[in-house]
Amino acid sequence: MNSNIFAAERLLFTKATPNTDAIPTIFAFPNEYTVGITSLGYQIVWATLAMRSDLEVNRLFTDIHEQLPRNLELVGFSVSWELDYINILNLLEFLEIPLRSSRRTDSHPLIFGGGTVLTANPEPFADFFDVILLGDGENLLDNFIDAYQEVRHADRSTKLEKLAQVPGVYVPSLYEVTYRDATGLIKSIQPINDKIPAKIEKQTYRGNTLSASTVVTEKAAWENIYMVEVVRSCPEMCRFCLASYLTLPFRTASLEGSLIPAIEKGLEVTDRLGLLGASVTQHPEFEILLDYLAKPKYDNVRLSIASVRTNTVTEKLAEILAKRDTRSLTIAVESGSEKLREIINKKLQNDEIIQAAINAKAGGLKGIKLYGMVGVPGEEVADLDATVSMMREIKKAAPGLRLTLGCSTFVPKAHTPFQWFGVNKQAEKRLKYLEKNLKAQGIEFRPESYNWSVIQALISRGDRRLSHLLELTRDYGDSLGSYRRAFKELRGKLPELDYYVHGNWDLEQVLPWSHLQGPLPVATLQKHRSMAIANFPQTKVET
């Protein structure tokens, strides 16, 4: 079975032949192959490692793996979804490696990880990793491997100390976290000696050649898709948004220099193209790219776009997408309330949203999916009514267009201005309120699980004390009930669930990620938070 799945891959890079003394390495994805191989981040890192002759790289997924090397030295994980931590622990067990870095000896490989989840806030997982790579992998990955080569034959502590000198490489065991008491706030986060940097800075790649698929396969969750990263980050800077704040500055791929050559290369092996990025249509030359893809030679191409900015949905865009087998568009609007969009810095008017729907229908698209959010700091019930009335207006303006509202609960994320706010305890009721009112209008509503949002918030704001909780919940199953059960069992050893999830945190307190430097200084995030609060309803000012 393994060989058939790997045999179906069409590689768009040339693997290096490993040297005789190449480092035996596993690069793992903590989920099934079909999910992992659809992750552009995983593909890129795997190819980067596999193109080095000083590494012998084999892949590991939860369901299949390539032949695993003996005398393993490095095991890497690409982590893009919080709850995959359970599979990380399962895979470490499968490899017979102690789950906690403190229990590993010189005979065990170094466990490293990267990806959005670990870059935002690695602390709940810090005790399971020897090394965490913060930020973009373009330069960081090679710098990490080069540094490892220099200390390859040294003992474990020498290796870790050397690696901690590499910008963007975080070695959690070399930092001591102290607490006011077992269930209290963090008192300080300090390096264990003066050779270790006090702050680790997330690495940012500033080039204009962005990522593109390194493998195409029919076995991927998106069958035979070739993905191209058109933009990185997002210029909109919605104040809750990790995809914008964590990845600043906004960067665009060079059209002639890299984007079009990459697309041509991919379309030689498949007819399915995915344009990726948090705000694809904000590429300054997006119109030219569209004209290029509209050429008759690409008539058979099936095109999908990750997300589009509302005011860029022209009839022409809709027409080209409809001809390229796209049936609907996805637009994040967050709310129908203009006041709430002021709070979150979503620069958008209702008439632009309505016009986008009209254009989508005129261009031949069958549906439009809007994304909303409840529980945003400063939200009132009137804001929900504004969303219902906006959806009603869209339905009236573009009759026959299939209209869906997907809706999540606000979850605070590290390195954003809203990291200090907790999850609104009314959010579940508000999802039900929207569901009832939109159903009455005949509009499809797809809420994301509120319980999952609670767990996501727990992990996104967690500190190292959560590692014991995560081990327990894995044994109990990963339902909300199993988290509550684990909190009960660990009572007195860490703060309550409410503290991590629902608490509004003090601006002065030490955050779990205070020693990790994101793209913007804390003072700037606090300023952006104050700008949001200035738009709060007067009765609800939170400080």
Image (cartoon, grey):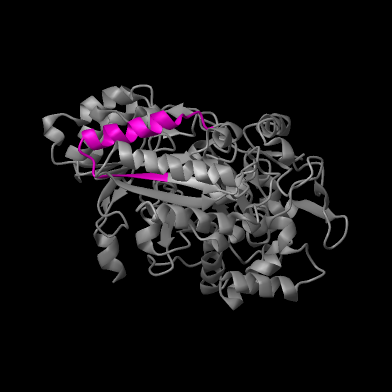
Q: Residue at x 31, y 36 (%)?
A: 397
Give, as a single range, the part of the protein colored magenta. Answer: 346-370
Q: Which of 455/121 is in front? A: 455
| Residue 492 screen position, x and y as percent | 82, 69
Residue 438 sits above or below residue 249 on the image: below
Residue 21 visible somewhere in the drawing: no
| Residue 499: percent from left, percent from top | 75, 57
Please tell me which residue lies in front, 66 or 540.
Answer: 540
- The residue at 60%/61% (across/down) is 455
* Displayed quadrant of residue 12: top left
Image position, residue 143 (x, y; %) = 55, 40
* Residue 39 appears in view: yes
| Magenta region includes residue 349 | yes
Q: Is residue 488 above or below residue 147?
A: below
Q: Is residue 513 above or below residue 154?
A: above
Task: Out of 345 and 104, give the one closest to the viewer.
Answer: 345
